[in-house]
Image (spheres, coloured by chain):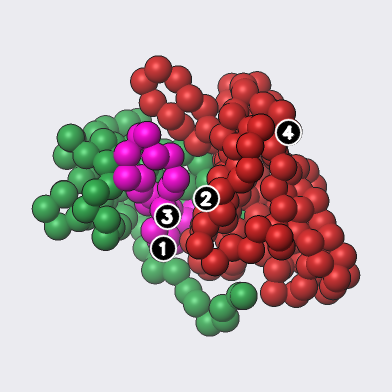
Chain colours: A red, B green
Amino acid sequence: GAVVSQHPSWVICKSGTSVKIECRSLDFQATTMFWYRQFPKQSLMLMATSNEGSKATYEQGVEKDKFLINHASLTLSTLTVTSAHPEDSSFYICSALLADLSYNEQFFGPGTRLTVL
Amino acid sequence: GESVGLHLPTLSVQEGDNSIINCAYSNSASDYFIWYKQESGKGPQFIIDIRSNMDKRQGQRVTVLLNKTVKHLSLQIAATQPGDSAVYFCAETPSRGNNRLAFGKGNQVVVIP
């Protein structure tokens, strides 16, 4: 159980286009999901917290108009990279929060490799 | 943007030996710590966690040690196997009420058959 999927697993796009990445919790509901970005040989950096039915909370330095997040249902959050540029090329990873009585655990998706030409 | 020339600290270990991976954290208010394993091109995979009211926790072939005095966390892997080759990250969160995770820099483990 507690599987998180991402789609697409990789995408190549031209500079200036927008790219949407989906994050789905397959067998549980998640009111909270997180979006991370990871550059090669580096750690995961939290970009934003996605809350179902409300606005996302962005980390300092992350442009909300650049990285649009929509969490329209309890199993789906989307990240749209608008007007993508080569510097946005990265590995984008989402996680979904499974909340139960004893602890909250994040389950991570497999990641989406974005390459902007 | 991307940084070039970076490399992760790498631990090369012979198959069957024990591995120890270390992590220093800076937030003395952190209450909950997790070790993740990340294989190339994949998302992080939960290994083991520990709360700040504990100093040791054991799982299957893994042990996490927490030293709050020096803000140090370690992961011990017993009888390391080729499948353990990956990058290992520690992560911390101020409390379970605050679920935002801050990841450490990562350590590459290479298991030599």
**How far apart are the alpha carbons under marks 3 and 4?**
27 Å
Name the chain letter of the residue that bears numbered label 1.
B
Residue found at the very far left of the displayed protein: B69
The answer to whether residue A48 is magenta is no
Region in magenta: B86-111
Q: Amino acid at mark 1?
A: Lys
Q: Residue B48 is drawn in which quadrant?
A: top left
Q: Amino acid at mark 3?
A: Phe
Q: Nearer the viewer, mark 2 or mark 4?
A: 4
Report if the CB atoms under discs 2 and 1 are less than 8 Å apart.
no
Q: Residue at x 52, y 57 (%)?
A: A59
Report if the CB atoms under discs 1 and 3 are less than 8 Å apart.
yes
- Give the quarter of the figure containing the N terminus of chain B: bottom right
State the mark number for residue A72: 4
Report if the CB atoms under discs 1 and 4 are less than 8 Å apart.
no
Instruction: Point out the tag, 2 or 1, that comes first from the N-terminus.
Output: 2
* Label 2 secondary element: strand
Name the chain letter of the residue that bears numbered label 4.
A
The answer to whether residue B102 is magenta is yes
Report if the CB atoms under discs 3 and 2 are less than 8 Å apart.
no
Instruction: Point out the tag, 3 or 2, that comes first from the N-terminus.
Output: 2
Q: Do circles 1 and 3 both sit on a common chain?
A: yes
Q: Amino acid at mark 4?
A: Ala
**Residue with the mark numbered 3:** B103
**How far apart are the alpha carbons under marks 1 and 4?**
33 Å
**How far apart are the alpha carbons under marks 2 and 1?**
12 Å
**Residue with the mark numbered 1:** B105
